């Protein structure tokens, strides 16, 4: 084995050792970036999807890039959980709007429509 290859293998081994030790810890050892608003969740989803694509295009995938992927997924999970929760809230608001329109309640329709539009604004801007 030539010296550069040996140096590469040794450096990867040294860098990866803490990663392997952490792998035995519970899966909740990373928190990820929070997604406290829908806007922040959408931003995190966009940015971290791009980062994940970059990591996945790394050849070959190494223990370090696998660890990077592992860390990225926490932020992505937080983002998707927030998006799902907010979409659920939008669905409830839209259903209330739908029912208000069925019973011919213009003031409710106006009020509920504003709420729904405000909730869904980050998705359509």
Image (cartoon, grey):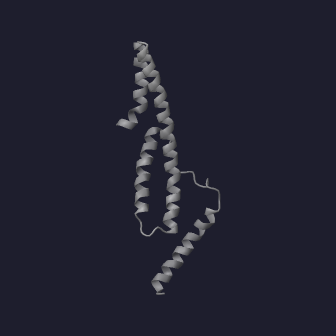
Most distant residue in the left direction: 125
Q: Position of residue 31 (x, y in %)?
A: 57, 51
- Identify the residue at image location x=48%, y=87%: 1
Is residue 5 visible from the viewing direction of this image?
Answer: yes
Is residue 36 visible from the viewing direction of this image?
Answer: no
Name above or below for residue 4 compared with residue 35: below
Q: Nearer the viewer, residue 40 or 97?
A: 97
Q: Position of residue 61 (x, y in %)?
A: 46, 67
- Identify the residue at image location x=43%, y=43%: 42
Q: Nearer the viewer, residue 115 or 84?
A: 84
Q: How many marks?
A: 0
- Identify the residue at image location x=41%, y=58%: 53
Quarter of the rendering occupied by the C terminus: top left
Q: Position of residue 107 (x, y in %)?
A: 41, 14
Name above or below for residue 111 compared with residue 83: above
- Identify the residue at image location x=49%, y=33%: 88
Q: Is residue 6 left or right of residue 109?
A: right
Q: Is residue 63 left or right of residue 55?
A: right
Most distant residue in the front direction: 102
Name above or below for residue 109 compared with residue 75: above
Name above or below for residue 120 compared with residue 102: below
Q: Position of residue 23 (x, y in %)?
A: 61, 62
Q: Nearer the viewer, residue 87 or 99?
A: 99
Most distant residue in the bottom direction: 2
């Amino acid at each position: 084995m030539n010296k550069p290859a040996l140096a590469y293998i040794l450096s990867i081994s040294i860098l990866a050792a803490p990663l392997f030790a952490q792998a035995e810890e519970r899966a909740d050892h990373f928190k990820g970036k929070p997604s406290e608003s829908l806007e922040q969740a959408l931003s995190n989803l966009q940015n971290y999807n791009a980062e994940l694509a970059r990591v996945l295009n790394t050849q070959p995938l190494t223990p370090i890039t696998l660890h990077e992927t592992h860390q990225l997924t926490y932020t992505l999970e937080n983002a998707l959980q927030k998006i799902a929760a907010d979409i659920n809230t939008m669905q409830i608001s839209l259903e209330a709007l739908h029912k208000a329109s069925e019973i011919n309640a213009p003031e409710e329709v106006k009020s509920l429509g504003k709420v729904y539009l405000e909730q869904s604004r980050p998705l359509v801007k």
